[in-house]
Image (cartoon, helix red, strand yellow):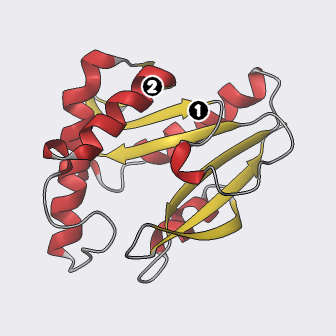
Amino acid sequence: MTITIREGGPDDLPAILRMLDSGVEWLVSQGRTRQWGTEPLSGNKTARAVERAVAEGTTYIAEIDGEPAAALVLADGPGAHLAHLPAPGEPERYIRWLASDRRFKGRGAGGALLAHAAEVTRRAGVGLLRVDCYAGDDRKLVAYYEANGFTPTHAYTHGPDAWPGQVLARRVG
C-alpha cells in the first residue's frame, strides 16, 4: 500500500462528496446521526459549502494505490460559521474539511493529510494550524485530532440545535 498526496481542485469535488457520503453512511450504521444527519451530504447545502471551500483554499488528496482515499482543504482561516470565536492573534492555516472514504478506514490517509497540512503550514512560515470538528457523543473525533498532535482550545455550539463543536490547534514551527 502506498499513500501519495497531490494537490486537488474543483475536478475532485465528486470524489470528495463521495467521501463525505460514505462517512454519513458509516455514521448512520453506527447510530451516530447527530454529526452529519442521515441523508447524503452531496445532495444538500453541504455540497455548496465544500465547493466554496475548495475554491477559497488549497485542496490536497491522499491516494492509496492511485485511488482517492481522503481529502483536506487548507485555508488562511475558518469559515464564516466560526466568526463568533476569538481570533488567534497570529497568522494561521485552517483545515476547513477533512474527509475520508470509509473503504480506506484505518490505512492512514487522514493522518497523512494532517501531517502534510502541518508541513505545508510550517514551510509557509506560519506556526499555527487549527481545525474544528464535531465534539458530541463520545468525542472520538476530538480524540482523533488529539492523537494527531492537536490540542482543544475553544468549545462552541452552532445553530438552533446547539451542534457541539470543538476548535483544536497544533503548533508547527
Question: Where 120 falls versus 24 (above or below)?
Answer: above
Which quadrant holds residue 30? bottom left
Q: Helix, strand or loop at disc 2?
A: strand
Q: Inspect this view and state whether residue 58 appears.
A: yes
- Left or right: 170 as drawn, with respect to 7: right
- Where residue 51 sits in the image (x, y, percent)? 33, 29
- Where residue 164 sits in the image (x, y, percent)? 49, 73
Q: Quadrant of the N terminus?
A: top left
Number of other residues with Cα within 10 Å of mark 2, as a class: few under 14, some 14 to 19, many 20 or more: many
Question: Given this view, does label 2 or label 1 mark the residue nearer the observer?
Answer: 2
> Which numbered marker is on residue 59?
2
> Which numbered marker is on residue 85?
none
Question: Where 153 falls versus 100 (above or below)?
Answer: below
Q: Earlier in the sequence, mark 2 or mark 1?
A: 2
Q: Inspect this view and state whether residue 1 appears.
A: no
Instruction: State the CA–CA distance, disc 2 to disc 1.
Output: 11 Å
Q: Helix, strand or loop at disc 1?
A: helix
Which quadrant holds residue 75? top right
> Which numbered marker is on residue 116?
1
Residue located farthest toward the front when viewing the structure as drawn: 160
- Left or right: 112 as drawn, with respect to 19: right
Q: Residue at x 80, y 48 (%)?
A: 88
Number of other residues with Cα within 10 Å of mark 1, as a class: few under 14, some 14 to 19, many 20 or more: some
